[in-house]
């Protein structure tokens, strides 16, 4: 049984849980409480496992912080409160970028309950520029879903190789074309775009047809 009295619950948790069915949302909420206060770790699958993978590190931070403060003198409540606020602020600053990126990842994965491979476990994906671009992020996850639907192999090594190919493109516009062509053609890989394709795409942007 944990000695923790309180923990941080971020708005990003609420945002990603809001998209779940009520039954699944309640299961994840109960899992959070049981993990923090009773040290019971859930055994989720599918989207619930993906969400848990993204939330668990922050829960561990809250638990560790609470344990560090557990030995403070009882008569020094104000000092503890100030210290807690300062630590919360510092933690939020450090984790804000991860939370921002994670929520985009969760929202785009949420439609795929059968997704067996969690992108959150891929270090190359989490550290790529693709996750910071909402359109590329959505397209990449759509491509991973396509691979699963067509029984193509999915692994950490494959994710890393695909990310590297996209990162080698000169611009996000080129990456968008590569992703769309792979999705539309149900390809197993990404291929560089031709000069003609690059010209046509850039012309659309210059003409104001769309922007990435």
Image (tube, helix red, strand yellow):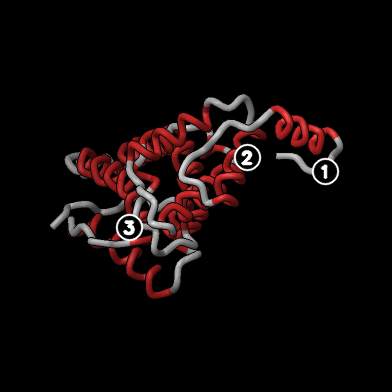
Residue drawn 27% across and 45% down? 60
Residue under the image location 34 percent in, 64 percent down: 28
State the residue position of label 1: 209
Q: Residues within 10 Å of mark 2 (few under 14, many from 20)?
A: many
Direction from residue 75 to residue 155 in the image, left or right: right
Q: Which residue is mark 2?
A: 176
Whichever of labels 2 and 1 marks the residue nearer the N terminus, that label is: 2
Mark 3 and mark 2: span between their CA atoms? 28 Å
- Is residue 78 visible to the viewer in this orientation of the structure? no
Q: CA distance from mark 2 to mark 1?
A: 15 Å
How far across and down, in percent of the image, does residue 158 sit? 37, 39
Q: Nearer the viewer, mark 3 or mark 2?
A: 2
Q: Nearer the viewer, residue 198 or 40?
A: 198
Extreme-right residue of the structure: 207
Toward the bottom, the furthest residue is 23
N-terminal of the two: label 3 or label 2? 3
Q: x, y (%) of residue 203?
A: 81, 33
Q: Nearer the viewer, residue 49 or 122?
A: 122
Q: Position of residue 85 (x, y in %)?
A: 40, 39
| Kind of element beneath mark 3 | helix
Position in image of residue 102 (x %, y %) = 45, 45
Residue 171 higher or lower than 47, as above or below:
above
- Where is mark 3, residue-wise? 49
């Amino acid at each position: 049984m944990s000695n923790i009295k309180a923990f941080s619950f971020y708005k990003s948790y609420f945002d990603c849980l809001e998209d779940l069915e009520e039954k699944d949302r309640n299961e994840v909420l109960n899992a959070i409480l049981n993990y923090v206060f009773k040290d019971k770790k859930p055994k989720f699958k599918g989207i619930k496992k993906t969400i848990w993978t993204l939330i668990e590190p922050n829960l561990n931070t809250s638990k560790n912080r609470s344990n560090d403060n557990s030995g403070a003198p009882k008569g020094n409540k104000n000092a503890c409160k100030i210290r807690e606020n300062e630590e919360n602020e510092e933690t939020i600053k450090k984790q804000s970028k991860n939370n921002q990126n994670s929520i985009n990842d969760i929202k785009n994965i949420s439609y795929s309950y059968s997704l067996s491979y969690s992108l959150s476990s891929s270090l190359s994906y989490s550290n790529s520029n693709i996750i910071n671009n909402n359109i590329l992020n959505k397209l990449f996850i759509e491509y991973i879903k396509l691979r699963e639907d067509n029984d193509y192999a999915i692994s950490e090594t494959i994710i890393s190789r695909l990310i590297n190919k996209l990162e080698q493109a000169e611009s996000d516009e080129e990456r968008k074309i590569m992703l769309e062509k792979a999705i539309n053609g149900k390809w197993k890989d990404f291929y560089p775009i031709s000069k003609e394709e690059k010209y046509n795409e850039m012309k659309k942007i210059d003409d104001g047809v769309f922007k990435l």
